[in-house]
Image (cartoon, rainbow, N blue to C red):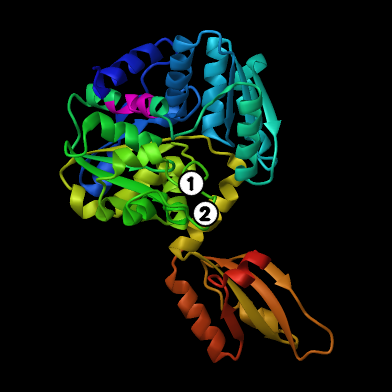
């Protein structure tokens, strides 16, 4: 019987006809910052800017090897899986029908069309992914197509395991620590199946708003989350795959990290500004996790898998906003302003030289002694806000911080 590593080797060899191995790069900035030998496995540099091409290629090639006449492949995805499937369908010259939610950004739809060309049809159905998935599966069954799961499929898992083989070959050995982003579990299941759970130290990181692996570990089996924060769209999965968890069932709670979406934004900005590396939220998870394991990795060789770089720059203002709020450098206030000449000027005089007004809305109502101002302020030192609030209170101005009051801030911001 062929063992898993042999299957991985065969799958990896076949992939070389389509794309080269993604680079494993030592990152001097992160190595110096954390006192470790840190390497990035740059899956964001694959032809579709994510590792998803691997699983799609292996799954489709295996189906075609068994059933050469199969000419219809179907998937449901709003992101990297769709692009991987499209690319591989074009490579093999087979038809792919890709279902996407109606709310999918045009940038992702266009990229999928570019990768698939005339071999891919895109169908926009449903406001939510569950509706899209149901429609895709119904169509697939009716048309006798082959459904391509984004992660809960043994051929997909096997394809993703090629990342592990490349890491070992490029590094020349197994690293001391490997940090893996987790969504549905395809990548982590493949790498753990290749190396084995006891071969090295694993750190699994998932978004705080989509911690499906942590839930499965606690439940000793896959569990569907009640709600999911979709910000980390490449890893925000409500339920880890059953086949994936079968490979991860020995994971312990201390190996799983929940990454704050807001802190993740600071890492995305840092990697962009310092290293010139564009990472999507899911692609930055493993780098962000280094902060939580800094004491554990000093002097060790660490590989972080940067899983994807499909970032829509229209999201950059939101990423910057969340990063500033996490760092405490931007806050929102409701200012109760006396209706007298010079009151606003008095308040503005309380701002420091490095305080900047980023938002200002005057909400005065008639026949009132006080008007209301919604104001957003940016600064270079979070301590400046405490000084401002104290100065305003002493002068008799009401200044209410609503940054963390989601009911109000989400409406106004």
Q: Give the spatial CA distance, label 1 vs label 2.
A: 7 Å
In magenta segment, residue 162? yes
Q: Give residue 327's position: percent from left, percent from top.
A: 44, 62
Q: Residues within 10 Å of mark 1 (few under 14, many from 20)?
A: many
Q: Residues within 10 Å of mark 2 (few under 14, many from 20)?
A: some
- The count of marks equals 2
Tell me the residue at 26%/50% (across/down).
Answer: 255
The local secondary structure at tag 2 comes to loop
Which numbered dot is residue 228? 2
Q: Is residue 390 left or right of residue 213?
A: right
The quadrant of the image that shows the N terminus is: top left
Closer to us: 145 or 267: 145
Q: Is residue 166 left or right of residue 139?
A: left
Circles 1 and 2 in contact, beta carbons < 8 Å: yes
Q: Kindly identify which residue carries mark 1.
A: 237
Closer to us: 339 or 232: 232
On the image, which quarter does residue 274 sit in? top left
Q: Give residue 197's position: percent from left, percent from top.
A: 21, 39
Q: Main secondary structure of the magenta part?
A: helix
Task: Point out the stretch of residues depicted in magenta.
Answer: 157-164
């Amino acid at each position: 019987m062929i063992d898993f590593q042999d299957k991985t080797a065969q799958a990896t060899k076949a992939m070389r006809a389509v794309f080269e191995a993604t680079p494993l790069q030592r990152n001097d900035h992160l190595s110096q910052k954390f006192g470790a030998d840190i390497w990035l496995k740059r899956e964001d540099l694959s032809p579709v800017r994510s590792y998803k091409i691997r699983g799609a290629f292996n799954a489709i090639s295996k189906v075609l090897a068994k059933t050469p006449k199969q000419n219809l492949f179907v998937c449901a995805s709003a992101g990297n899986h769709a692009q991987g499937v499209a690319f591989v369908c074009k490579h093999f010259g087979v038809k792919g029908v890709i279902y996407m939610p109606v709310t999918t950004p045009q940038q992702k739809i266009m990229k999928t069309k570019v990768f698939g060309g005339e071999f891919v049809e895109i169908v926009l159905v449903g406001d939510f992914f569950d509706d899209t998935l149901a429609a895709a599966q119904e169509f697939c069954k009716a048309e006798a197509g082959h459904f391509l799961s984004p992660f809960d499929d043994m051929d997909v898992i096997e394809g993703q395991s090629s990342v592990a083989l490349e890491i070992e070959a490029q590094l020349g050995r197994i690293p001391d620590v490997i940090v893996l982003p987790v969504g549905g579990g395809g990548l982590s299941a493949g790498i753990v199946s290749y190396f084995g759970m006891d071969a090295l130290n694993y750190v699994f990181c998932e978004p705080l708003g989509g911690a499906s692996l942590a839930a499965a570990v606690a439940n000793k089996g896959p569990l569907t989350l009640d709600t999911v924060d979709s910000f980390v769209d490449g890893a925000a999965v409500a339920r880890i795959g059953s086949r994936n968890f079968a490979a991860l069932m020995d994971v312990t709670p201390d190996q799983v990290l929940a990454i704050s979406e807001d802190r993740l934004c600071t890492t995305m900005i840092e990697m962009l500004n310092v290293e010139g590396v564009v990472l999507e939220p899911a692609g930055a998870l493993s780098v962000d996790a280094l902060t939580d394991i800094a004491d554990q990795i000093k002097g060790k060789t660490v590989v972080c898998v940067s899983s994807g770089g499909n970032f829509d720059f229209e999201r950059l203002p939101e990423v910057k906003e969340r990063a500033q709020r996490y760092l405490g450098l931007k806050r929102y206030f409701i200012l109760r302003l006396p209706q007298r000449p010079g009151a606003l000027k008095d308040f503005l005089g309380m701002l420091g030289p490095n305080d900047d007004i980023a938002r200002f809305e005057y909400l005065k109502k008639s026949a009132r002694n006080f008007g209301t101002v919604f104001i957003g302020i940016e600064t270079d030192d979070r301590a400046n806000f405490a000084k401002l609030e104290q100065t305003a209170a002493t002068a008799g101005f009401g200044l209410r911080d609503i940054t963390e009051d989601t009911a109000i801030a989400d409406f106004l911001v």
